[in-house]
């Protein structure tokens, strides 16, 4: 069976039935395994439109795959990856003056920022400190950088 034979979203929907019946550690393992399988299935899809359904003389496309890269992280980290912050520099400076943390997202050359308020609980602060070395998360299916 190829990845093209099973929509990734359908895997998640069908997996909800066993998830409702399972308990304890088995359910936790299931809840980690199913999204991982769905992601692997999605990454195995070739470029193009998949899972087409006829609908009122039109075709519904349930999945479209292209090989774009998504980068998420601190603005400094995205700059290190070659992403130009350009017109958002003023907004980033204003956020820094307000004491807020900015998270940047770049997709297809489009950049967005999200401000995070510093009012967080001590527990979250500890988690953030622990995760700080892993500031950058990237999903990429091609080696080219975001420009």
Image: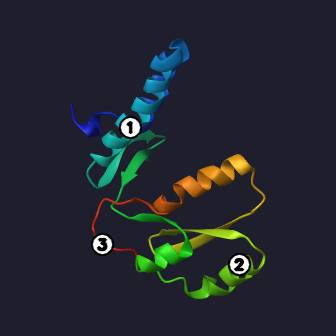
> Which callout, 1 or 2, points at the residue further toward the start of the chain?
1
Whether residue 7 can be seen here: no
Placement of 85 over or under 127, stated as above or below: below
Residue 133: percent from left, percent from top: 48, 61
Question: What residue does disc 3 label?
Answer: 144
Q: Are marks 1 and 2 in contact (CB under 8 Å)?
A: no
Q: Residue at x 48, y 19 (%)?
A: 25
Question: What residue does disc 1 label?
Answer: 36
Q: Which quarter of the figure has residue 116?
A: bottom right
Placement of 95 over or under 116, stated as above or below: below
Residue 44 left/right relative to 90: left
**Secondary element type, mark 2:** helix
Placement of 65 over or under 26, stated as above or below: below
Q: Residue at x 53, y 55 (%)?
A: 131
Q: Which quarter of the figure has residue 29?
A: top left
Q: Nearer the viewer, residue 80 or 124?
A: 124
Q: Are marks 2 and 3 in contact (CB under 8 Å)?
A: no
> Crowding at label 1, few (<14), some or many (≥20) Cα neighbours within 10 Å?
few
Q: Nearer the viewer, mark 2 or mark 3?
A: 2
- Specify the label residue 96 is tagged with: 2
Residue 73: percent from left, percent from top: 52, 66
Residue 142 left/right relative to 137: left
Residue 37: percent from left, percent from top: 35, 35
Q: Nearer the viewer, residue 106 or 63?
A: 106
């Amino acid at each position: 069976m190829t990845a093209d034979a099973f929509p990734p979203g359908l895997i998640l929907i069908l997996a909800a039935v066993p998830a409702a019946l399972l308990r304890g550690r088995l359910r936790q393992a299931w809840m980690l395994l199913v999204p991982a399988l769905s992601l692997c299935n999605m990454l195995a899809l070739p470029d193009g439109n998949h899972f087409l359904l006829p609908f009122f003389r039109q075709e519904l496309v349930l999945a479209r795959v292209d090989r774009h890269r998504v980068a998420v992280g601190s603005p400094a980290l995205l700059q290190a990856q070659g992403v130009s912050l350009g017109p958002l520099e003023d907004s980033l400076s204003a956020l820094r003056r307000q004491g807020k943390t900015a998270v940047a997202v770049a997709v297809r050359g489009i950049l967005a920022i999200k401000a995070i308020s510093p009012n967080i609980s001590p527990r979250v602060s500890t988690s953030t400190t622990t995760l700080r070395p892993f500031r950058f998360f990237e999903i990429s299916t091609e080696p080219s950088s975001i420009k």
